[in-house]
Image (spheres, rainbow, N blue to C red):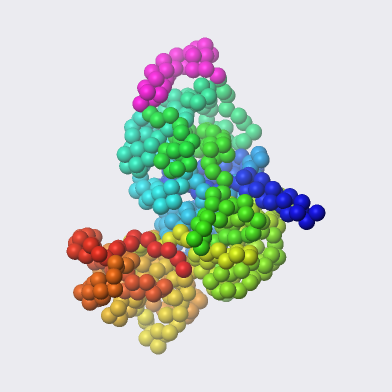
């Protein structure tokens, strides 16, 4: 009897896992991420949340005022993970904050997804932030679906856009749809695999409205309505079929090829096709490496890791929410799970879940889902939780900061509080802290400047420390390892001035310039300079 129950549960865990898709949207600011997110939520029937996305966007412009930051962050606790049901599937959409709140969080969110949706403004092509985010996806060969947005406007030539993605991002493009005209003459898209034209009509924003579909590129109705465009399309399609890569599911899953769709997010046009690609092609939760073995998502025992920590709305309560990605098993409310780093069991009474509809389902979670754990600073980024076997997940990285500030105390008597505050904020992942081997003021590192504002405000609010942040001549940092102890000792002696320890006690080289870094790397071939390092 017991055996049957166990196998029923195993089957259920497997089915639930296979229903899930967990992804993030990556894009340069203004490419249309917010708009597309809202449309995706519409399809999932989570209309009430769509407003939240918009509200958050307007809130994030005010960065100088701490309450505004808190508010923006508070709202984003609710909207930084959006879960919705679409047909048979459960979709987890993870927000990667853009704009000035671009931070290390953005990078780490990408370690918690199984695929990504890249949105490109077709008028601008590939932009800076997209390049950065794609590099991070590369670290794990994350499969990527591409959406060429805003074809209702004058855009770049579609072939040229594909060429740019291939050459700048180094990923093969397989067009799935092809635009018919653009701007005022945008007529729709042709589905290359289905031989079907989806006719564009502006303003069809609600999910009930389906766009007109006409089967066959030489359908007389199409020729009658769009005589010029269809002749042009036939030519282009021949060219596209000859010159571009046919879709190859394996190459997509390996992160080598991206299926490309054209459309207009604001008109909800082409969004359904994206969802279909996500469901049909994007992978369900993938196995993850932990403690030297691969953890399969359908394993019975629960496991997961924390990829993000966010301060809560109320600065009076130092409550933080840790975002945990479930990697295997079945989570239920009230469950006891082991916090590996501390070697302690915790019971999770009131996890935060993010399901937009069907509130009654929030009691449980499966691989691919994200749950929020309340904590008062005991949880760090990279922490693993599991049932039974101790599984420490790997691959949650710190990224070499690109911005640096020296922290100077206004009141020197507060040195202890400053140290404590910086240590905790570093463990939480809000910033990185470096201490030079030769002493002096601590140096903060970040990838987005908002991180400094947040640290300054939180030091003041939570640790009663007034600190001044000053420019410092550090341009980039690399974590250091050497082939042998002697090399490391020689290197340390020679470059003590540039060396520092981070909050985890790792040795880092703080380079005053890129040129200096390149030269130093050239001179020390036996020293390894890492641009990322793992947590814990
Ligand atoms: P983001 O989150 O990536 O930063 O971009 P967001 O969705 O906010 O879109 C940026 C701007 O581009 C918005 O205009 C939005 O309306 C517009 N947009 C998004 N998708 C499309 C599209 O398919 N076609 C056209 N023509 N425009 C699109 P805005 O004027 O900056 O903001 P708003 O006043 O419309 O909110």
Prevalent SS, magenta region:
helix
Q: Residue at x 57, y 42 (%)?
A: 40
Where's the N terminus, which quadrant? bottom right
User: Relative to 214, is 434 on the left or the right?
Assistant: left
Does the magenta run of residues contain 239?
yes
- Is residue 42 shown above or below 397? above
User: Relative to 149, is 522 on the left or the right?
Assistant: left
Residue 127 spot, x, y in % from top left: 35, 45
Q: Residue at x 49, y 17 (%)?
A: 217
Q: Residue at x 37, y 82 (%)?
A: 410
* Residue 52 visible in the displayed image: no
Residue 453 spot, x, y in % from top left: 42, 67
Q: For the view shown, which residue lies furthest in the right direction?
A: 1
Residue 36 spot, x, y in % from top left: 52, 42
The magenta stretch is 215-243
Does the magenta run of residues contain 164?
no
Residue 495 spot, x, y in % from top left: 23, 73
* Residue 473 visible in the displayed image: yes
Q: Residue at x 48, y 25 (%)?
A: 192
User: Relative to 405, is 317 on the left or the right?
Assistant: right
The foreground one among 465 and 289 is: 289
């Amino acid at each position: 009897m017991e055996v049957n129950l166990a196998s029923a549960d195993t089957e259920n865990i497997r089915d639930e896992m296979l229903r899930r898709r967990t992804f993030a949207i990556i894009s340069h600011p203004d490419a249309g991420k917010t708009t597309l997110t809202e449309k995706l939520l519409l399809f999932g029937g989570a209309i009430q949340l769509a407003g939240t996305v918009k509200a958050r966007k307007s809130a994030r412009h005010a960065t100088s005022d701490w309450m505004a930051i808190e508010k923006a962050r508070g709202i984003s606790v609710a909207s930084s993970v959006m879960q919705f049901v679409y047909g048979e599937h459960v979709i987890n959409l993870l927000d990667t904050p853009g704009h000035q709140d671009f931070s290390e969080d953005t990078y780490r969110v990408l370690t918690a997804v199984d695929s990504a949706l890249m949105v490109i403004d077709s008028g601008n092509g590939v932009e800076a932030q997209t390049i950065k985010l794609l590099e991070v996806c590369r670290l794990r060969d994350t499969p990527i679906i591409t959406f060429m947005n805003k074809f209702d406007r004058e855009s770049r030539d579609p072939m040229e856009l594909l060429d740019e993605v291939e050459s700048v991002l180094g990923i093969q493009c397989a067009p799935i749809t092809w635009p018919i005209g653009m701007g005022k003459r945008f007529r729709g898209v042709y589905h290359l695999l289905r031989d079907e034209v989806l006719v564009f009509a502006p303003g069809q924003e609600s999910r009930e409205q389906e766009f007109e579909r006409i089967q066959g590129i030489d359908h007389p109705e199409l020729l009658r309505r769009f005589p010029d465009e269809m002749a042009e399309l036939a030519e282009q399609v021949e060219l596209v079929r000859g010159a571009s890569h046919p879709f190859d599911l394996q190459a997509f899953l390996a992160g080598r090829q991206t299926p490309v769709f054209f459309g207009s997010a604001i008109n909800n046009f082409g969004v359904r096709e994206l969802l279909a690609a996500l469901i049909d092609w994007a992978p369900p939760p993938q196995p993850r490496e932990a403690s030297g073995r691969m953890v399969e998502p359908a394993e019975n025992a629960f496991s997961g890791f924390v990829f993000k920590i966010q301060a809560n709305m109320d600065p009076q309560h130092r409550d933080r929410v840790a975002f945990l990605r479930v990697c295997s098993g079945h989570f239920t409310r009230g469950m006891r799970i082991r916090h590996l780093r501390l070697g302690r069991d915790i019971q999770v009474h009131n996890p935060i879940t993010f399901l937009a509809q069907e509130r009654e389902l929030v009691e449980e979670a499966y691989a691919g889902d994200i749950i929020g754990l309340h904590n008062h600073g005991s949880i760090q980024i990279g922490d693993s939780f599991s049932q039974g076997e101790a599984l420490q997940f790997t691959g949650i990285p710190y990224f070499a900061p690109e911005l640096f500030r020296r922290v100077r105390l206004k009141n020197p008597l507060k040195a202890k509080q400053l140290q404590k505050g910086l240590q905790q904020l570093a463990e939480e992942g809000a910033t990185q802290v470096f201490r030079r081997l030769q002493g002096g003021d601590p140096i903060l590192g970040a990838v987005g400047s908002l991180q400094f504002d947040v640290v300054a405000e939180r030091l003041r609010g939570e640790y009663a420390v007034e600190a001044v942040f000053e420019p410092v001549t550090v341009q980039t940092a690399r974590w250091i390892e050497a082939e042998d102890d002697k090399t490391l000792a020689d290197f340390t002696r020679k470059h003590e001035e540039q060396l520092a320890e981070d909050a985890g006690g790792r040795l880092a080289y703080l380079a005053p310039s890129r040129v200096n870094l390149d030269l130093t790397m050239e001179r020390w071939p036996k020293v390894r300079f890492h641009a990322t390092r793992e947590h814990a």
